[in-house]
Image (cartoon, grey):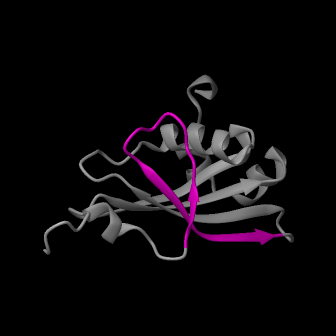
C-alpha cells in the first residue's frame, strides 16, 4: 500500500451519505440505500458501518443508536441483518423503520422480531 494512504478512506463507500451516530467513537456510518415503501409503511435502509480495529457493534447497540440518529422510536426500528466483511472492519447493516409498531409486527418475520427484542421485553 502506498505511504500516506488511510485505510478508512479506502473503505468509505463513494457517493454515500454520512449518518452522524452519537456514542460510538471510532465508528463511521454511511447510508448506501434509502428507500421508502409506502405500500407496507416502512423505510428500508442499507448502511455501511466502518469499524477498523474495533468489534462489530451488537444488534441491540445498533438499534438504540440508530433510532436516536434517525429520530424514530426504538420500537419501530428493526435490524434485519448485519454482515461483516472478513478482516476488513466493515459491515453492511439492513434496517427497516416502520410507521407504526403494529405494521412492524404484521410484516416482520417472527425470528427477526425475536432477534430485535429489547431487554425490557424479555
Q: How many marks?
A: 0
Which residue is found at the position 57% from the left and 48% from the top?
A: 20
Vertical order, 68 against 33 (above or below): above
Which residue is found at the position 84% from the left and 48% from the top?
A: 100
**Residue 121: percent from the left, percent from the top?**
63, 28
Quadrant location, the C terminus: top right
**Residue 107: percent from the left, percent from the top?**
74, 60
Which residue is found at the position 57% from the left and 39% from the top?
A: 65
Quadrant location, the N terminus: bottom left
**Residue 37: percent from the left, percent from the top?**
79, 70
**Residue 34: percent from the left, percent from the top?**
67, 69
Vertical order, 5 against 121 (above or below): below
Relative to 48, is 94 on the left or the right? right
Q: Nearer the viewer, residue 41 or 9?
A: 9
Residue 122: within the magenta?
no
Q: What is the magenta range?
A: 16-37
Residue 36: within the magenta?
yes
Relative to 98, is 84 on the left or the right? left
Q: Nearer the viewer, residue 64 or 107?
A: 64
Return the residue found at the far top: 120
Vertical order, 61 against 39 (above or below): above
Which residue is found at the position 59% from the left and 37% from the top?
A: 64
Q: Nearer the viewer, residue 110 or 31?
A: 31
Relative to 7, is 46 on the left or the right? right
Amino acid at each position: 500500500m502506498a505511504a500516506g494512504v488511510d485505510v478508512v478512506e479506502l473503505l468509505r463507500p463513494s457517493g454515500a451519505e454520512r449518518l452522524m451516530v452519537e456514542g460510538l467513537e471510532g465508528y463511521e456510518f454511511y447510508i448506501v440505500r434509502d428507500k421508502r415503501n409506502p405500500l407496507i409503511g416502512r423505510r428500508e435502509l442499507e448502511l455501511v458501518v466502518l469499524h477498523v480495529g474495533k468489534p462489530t457493534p451488537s444488534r441491540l447497540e445498533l438499534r438504540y443508536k440508530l433510532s436516536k440518529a434517525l429520530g424514530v422510536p426504538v420500537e419501530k426500528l428493526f435490524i434485519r441483518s448485519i454482515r461483516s466483511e472478513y478482516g476488513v472492519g466493515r459491515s453492511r447493516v439492513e434496517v427497516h423503520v416502520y410507521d407504526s409498531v403494529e405494521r412492524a409486527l404484521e410484516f416482520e418475520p417472527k425470528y427477526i422480531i425475536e432477534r430485535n427484542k429489547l431487554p425490557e421485553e424479555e
